[in-house]
Image (cartoon, rainbow, N blue to C red):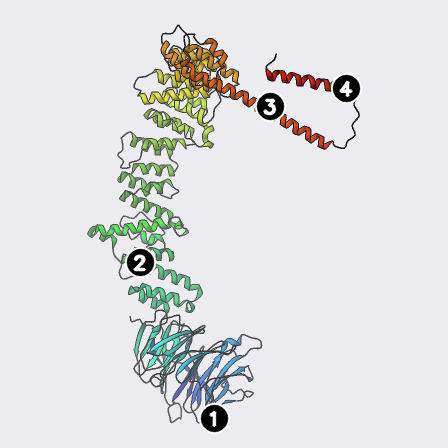
Amino acid sequence: MSLDVFSLTLAIENQPAGNEKDELHFCCLESCGKNLYVGTKDCFVHHFVLPDLSQPGNEKTCPQQKEGKKRHLGMKRPITQLKASPILTHLLVLSDSSVTVLNMFSLEPIQTMQKIRNVALFEVNEMAAFTDPVFVELFVVASKKKAIYIYAVSIDKWERVKEVPFPEEPLALAVDRSCLCVAMSDRYILHKHTSGTTKELFPYDKVKQNPIVKVVGRGEFLLNGPGSLGMFVTNCGISQRPPLQWPEQIHMAAVYFPYVVTLDSEALRVYSILDQQQKQLIPFQKGCILVSSQERVFVLTSKEIYSLIPVQIEEQIETLLSRERASEALDLVKGARAVIPKDKYKAVYQYVLQQAGFIKFFQECFSEAKELFIKGHLDLREVIALYPDSPPLSTTFKQPRPSVCNIKDLNQMKKEDPERLQRYKQFLVDFLSAIRLTEQAQRCKEQVDNTLLKLYAESGSEELIHLLSSDNACQLNECVHCLEKHQRYFALGFLYHSRDQDYNAIQTWIQIADGYLQESTQKDIHRHIVKFLSFQQKRELVWKYADWAVQKNQEVGVQIFTKRPQREQESFSYEEVIGFLKQYQLALMLYLEYLVTARNSKEERHHTLLAMSYLEQLLEKKDRDKITLFGTRTKLQVLLHESSFYNVAVIQDRVLDTELHTEIAILYSKQGEHDKALWTLVHKEQDFQAAERYCQRNSEGKDKAFRSMLFSTLLKIYLDSTTCNKNEQVTAAVDLLNNNVSVFDLVSVLQILPDSWSLQLLSRFLVESVRISIHYRRMESVEKSLAQAEHLRYRYSRAKATEGIIKPQRSKILIQGDEKKRKLKKTKTLKNAIGIT
């Protein structure tokens, strides 16, 4: 792809000067800053001053030769090489295989520095100049010798410090610090003179190719490789860039980063180092030498000197962008960082990113455009302003038109291709959503959020609620009309809330819940209002709408008070809420449940009211399904069983004349009247299993005597002969005995059982009772034996501990008494064993 990188102008035209009869014949050239040095065939060095390219109009101004600024070296051979050293203000001149040193400005020879003879070519390493004392390294290829000599050159002398041998005489040389890149007769090699290491690179055909070795940058060389390839090689001997594909017969090459200029018999060709593509072709014949400088590239013929003036990088970038070559423009600005002033680079780079983003945007490569806009820190309003019906932007904002050729009018697209416009709108949604919380969006956050709100409202996206329920900068006067237009009233409530207009928010939602406003959302508006009020800190607002919320649905509405955050619980006293909920039976019951279970209230009033609420619901059976009544009764029984804070007398007065016999029995148990409780369960409720469970529950943790008393009481009730359900109670009595054998005392049971009961009826109970009695006796015997063994072990331990201690002798009378007691005890034990009383 073509790109005007350089413009070719004539710099110096060879014309006779003064009385000179012959024209000058240019042989070599050197440029250093504004100084241009030209060597001629007749051994003259000419000094020219270059025009300043930073001044407008100087691109075509020819270099001016100062009066007397030329020097003849006193030889008849042509000058073949020039090299300036600005650090030392020296100009090194090669002629007739000898290197002479001149002053850069006066062109006077340095008398203290003798010529270096037998030189084929040389290179200077300026990097060595940053030392103390100041010197540069001079690398000299000795003619007809297989070596390179290294000289340390100072202001007034030079000294050969090293000889680097090679297998043959080098034909071309480039130096990068300690690394020498050398072209031999058939191959290239790398040599590091500090370590002495050598590495062969690749061969080339000397017959078809000119050996070319150029320094590209720090640690990198450009070589004329096989197959007409310009090879990039690092000082480690590897290639990190693809090669350049150039013509087979090129004469020379010069590096002007980020470009390489080549010279052949037909043209000058410009290649990019960054993407290895040919950018420009300039027809040119009779060129013989290429020399690059900081500001331009010089092309020499035998009679003229031409300048390749580089086009400003900014102009090249604009050209690429105008041709929609965004990738090339980005590569160029990245690669040219070294040649763009530091204070300008950031702005140039961001500009290229932004314009490349617009190119991709109008090509509908939206993901790439999004990434480029973000990296380029684009003012988001520049994108927003492109869209039809976009929200008003800041009065201080002026919309710059993107400097790209493929710009499209989205307003026209709205009429001609609405579907395509929708793709652009979706991009805007994705882009603004991704960036709205970043620093890049902070300077225009109102416009960003207004635009997102409009796009969400149009598309019906659920993200609208997320936007408005989080921190946002939507402007009320701009957004209310948009939400009303698209009937997004639920979202409108969130907008009011985000602007601290909670009254308007709730009123809007109530109108939706009551059917006055049509809303497409599937949300449970009533539940949302309740949740909103539960987090509301304004008491007057809560009380204003609590009655509406509870009246509409008591079960949900009461959550205004039961779902409040912990820190907000103290805002509403318990008694205040109870007083409000007295007119709503279900809501009051649920709130009291919350106080007793969740808040662990220990106030008698709360527990008593909760029990009374359960009772009222049970006794008012109208419009109540069986499942609800069963659940309420279960909760009442659990409360009566587990709570010890309610007023038993109050509950009892209310329940005695009802059919809630289980609850009456629980109340009797709270008063310790277990006989009444059991009688109620047996004769009123006629639930024998409940009676047995009653005994088990109430005897937990009590001693055996109490347990036996409780179960015996139930047994006596079963055996009461005055009841009409005698057969059922007999069966229940037998089951009670069989299921709880260990609780009953066998003798006591036998005393109260009717004489008419058969042995077969009681066989299971009797067998289990005898077995348990024997088991208990044996266990007591085992425990006694274990205690005796423990006592014997203790006595043994005590005897061992007191062994050797002198004890006072007991009297003979006491000893005889002890012996008599032992004999009596033994006799008694024997009598017991044989059953003698």
* Tag 1 and tag 2, C-beta contact below 8 Å: no
Please name which of the two marks, 3 or 1, marks the residue nearer to the observer: 3
Disc 2 to disc 4: CB gap under 8 Å: no
What whole-number distance in Å separates the C-alpha atoms at marks 2 and 4? 123 Å
Q: Within 10 angstroms of label 3, few (less than 14), some, or many (20 or more) residues?
A: few
Q: Position of residue 561 (x, y in %)?
A: 41, 28
> Residue 724's quadrant in the figure?
top left
First-in-chain label (3 vs 4)? 3
Amino acid tagged 2: Phe
Residue 59 shows in this picture? no
Is residue 103 or residue 698 the one in the foreground? 698
Q: Quarter of the image containing the N terminus?
A: bottom left
Instruction: Give the residue at x 41% y 88%.
Output: 40
Dividing the image into 4 quarters, which one contains the C terminus? top right
Q: Which of the numbered marks, if any, corresponds to residue 784?
A: 3
Reading the image, the residue beneath label 4 is 814
Q: For the view shown, which residue lies furthest in the left direction?
A: 416
What amino acid does circle 1 point to?
Gly
Camera-side mark, 4 or 1: 4
Secondary structure state at the residue bearing disc 1: loop
CA distance separating discs 3 and 2: 100 Å
Residue 352, given in percent of the width and then of the height, sits at 35, 62
Q: Position of residue 247 (x, y in %)?
A: 31, 79
| 736 relative position to 207: left or right | right
Task: Name the foreground residue: 722 vs 170.
Answer: 722
Q: Which residue is mark 1?
A: 74
Q: For label 2, count other residues whose C-alpha is less than 10 Å away and answer few (under 14), some (14-19) or many (20+).
A: many
Q: Which residue is mark 2?
A: 358
Ranked by sequence position, the earlier of labels 3 and 1 is: 1
